[in-house]
Image: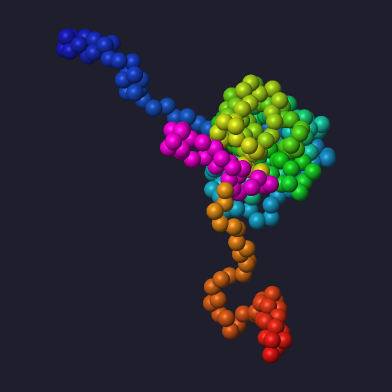
Amino acid sequence: GINAEYGGLLRTLLRPRALQSALRPAQVCSVRTFSDEVVNDFYTRHTAKDVTIRRTEDQAEVDKKAYPDIEKLEKFGLYIASILPKYVQDVRITSTKELEILIHPEGIVPVLGMLRDHTNAQFKSLMEITAVDVPAREYRFELVYCLLSHIYNARCIVKTYTDELTPIDSVTALYKSADWGERECWDMYGVYFSGHPDLRRILTDYGFDGHPQRKDFPLTGYTECRYDNELGRVVYEPVEVAQEFRRFELETPWELFPNYRETPEHLLEAARDEIIEEEKKK
């Protein structure tokens, strides 16, 4: 019995550490959410008078357990607006019960730094950076930063704006994941990030002309590449469209119910012109 006991102890000591840790009983990890005990003390001392939370009328049907309470999200948004009134311009609740914070371009570093380091926020992960191009606006580019808090199981979206010439401060010092995200926005939209350690194209080829995701970028681009058998390498040439672009009518080409469909005005005018020409010939 003693030999068996010492033998079992010896086998345990000689067992690899990875196997020992795998045989340990699993520990239950609890995920904290926005609770009254954590944040209510701050909200009672800070109130925002200039920011009004706006909800989307048609709320999407989502799992209530997957998202925090919308009332507490509103309180958190008001709290952010009250402590950073210089930069926060609006706060919204999306249809998927996510918090949107609209800020001034100069406040991108202070606001993201506060959301990352604040005890009641701790948005430690920057999931993605993207942009939206609306040429009709004075500031045509809208930048979108998607943040995630693992501790509180919550998401936050920060939006700001800029144009072709105004640079935006880089947040690579706050989030390492912003490196490639900012390079992608520069490559696709031409948004310049000041302070980026290595701002260069990431998706397009060397010497690419323009930014493909801009609305005014031509669909065919400016150059095309092909492999030249004589030169033995890939060559770039101006785009040559083999066939002219056709003008397609917006109306459906499949007349399912022609007897109950009104004839387009331009077809009626063309028919009248043909009748007039035939009468002149006679």
Q: Position of residue 278 (x, y in %)?
A: 67, 86
**Count of marks placed on residues:** 0
Image quadrant in which you'd find residue 245: bottom right
Relative depth, front residue between 163 and 24: 163
Which stretch appears magenta?
Answer: 215-239
Name the residue at the bottom extreme: 282
Q: Determine whether 73 is above or below 124 in the image.
A: below
State left or right for residue 137 relative to residue 190. right
Name the residue at the right extreme: 50
Q: Position of residue 20 (x, y in %)?
A: 32, 18
Residue drawn at 71 percent across, 40 percent down = 141
Quadrant where the image shows the C terminus: bottom right
**Residue 224 drawn in magenta:** yes
Relative depth, front residue between 156 and 266: 266
Q: Determine whether 251 is above or below 63 in the image.
A: below
Image quadrant in which you'd find residue 90: top right
Residue drawn at 59 percent across, 24 percent down = 176
Relative depth, front residue between 180 and 250: 250
Quadrant where the image shows the N terminus: top left
